[in-house]
Amino acid sequence: MKVIVLGATALLASTAWGHTIFCQLKTDAQTYAVSYGIRTPSYDGPQTDVSSSNLACNGPPNPTTPSDKIIDVKAGGTVNAIWRHTLQSGANDVMDAGHKGPVMAYLKKVTDAKSDSGVGNGWFKIQEAGWSNGVWGTDTVVNSGGNQAIKIPDCIENGQYLLRAEMIALHGARSAGGAQLYMECAQINVTGGTGTKNPTTASIPGIYKSNDPGLLIDIYNHPPSSTNPYKIPGRQKT
Ligand SMILES: *[C@@H]1O[C@H](CO)[C@@H](O)[C@H](O)[C@H]1NC(C)=O
Ligand SMILES: [Cu+2]
């Protein structure tokens, strides 16, 4: 009974504190303004249909605003995707702490980062944090003022990419379609890459299934453990 009460408390908390948006990018060089070079929505709601084309770079019911900016990023450097509850929120209002789950980042090489929809093949994962010793990837982001640190591989080709940062909340994931997926795409221009590696790519949508063990999971009654590790959804990190 105790676990069921815990679950209900977390669900109430999520209503009060709301969801999240990847709204700002920090590079080795500077911190850019909110929505600079990122297609941000005005509403912070999740995507829940893993077969929807809106899974690539968000979209209805959270329509995003295009950006005509491209952010310079160094291969081999680290960027921070900065997450906030709303476009106006500060570092103490990242996301309801009851939203527990994995955090990931993907890249897709594109010809024009300003206009490419991101939908379809070409995505490869460059960062992931699932569950470790009771700490979820989302906990780390919430507890670090909304910062998701992402290392840009040094072996990729130079050129324009979409950088898709994602957080997944699993409080409702005990039934299929209950996981809440949050993602936005930043428009970046990579320099200094060696171009020595051609990552294996996958399609978004397509990379997740609603019954993936990392998306269909009762984290209250069957939480991960050292003997029952959490399986991060999506293709393994390149
Ligand atoms: C990307 O960076 C290269 C090298 O600095 C530059 O020549 C190119 O114009 C940049 N492209 C965009 C779209 O910013
Ligand atoms: Cu939410």
Image: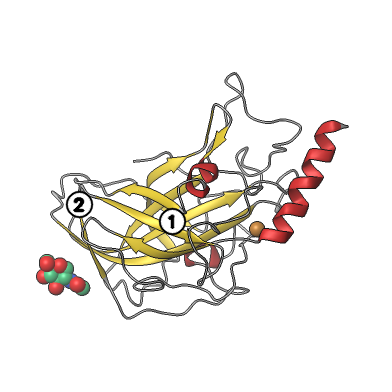
Describe residue 26's horizontal placement relative to residue 178 as left or right: left
Is ligand 2 less than 8 Å from the beta carbon at label 1? no
**Residue 24, relative to residue 148: is it above or below?**
below
Nearest the camera: 140 or 207? Answer: 140
Picture residue at 51% right of the left edge, 38% below the top: 130
Where residue 51 sits: x, y (%)? 59, 59
**Residue 107, relative to residue 198: is it above or below?**
below
Query: Looking at the figure, which quarter contains the N terminus?
Result: top right
Which residue in the structure is indicated by mark 1? 165
Picture residue at 78% right of the left edge, 46% below the top: 9
Where residue 176 sits: x, y (%)? 72, 49
Nearest the camera: 133 or 205? Answer: 133
Describe residue 58's horizontal placement relative to residue 212 as left or right: left
Which residue in the structure is indicated by mark 2? 75
Nearest the camera: 40 or 16? Answer: 16
* Residue type (three-letter) at the residue carrying disc 2: Ala
Where residue 94 sits: x, y (%)? 54, 57
Few, some or many residues within 10 Å of mark 1 (<14, 14–19, 20+)? many
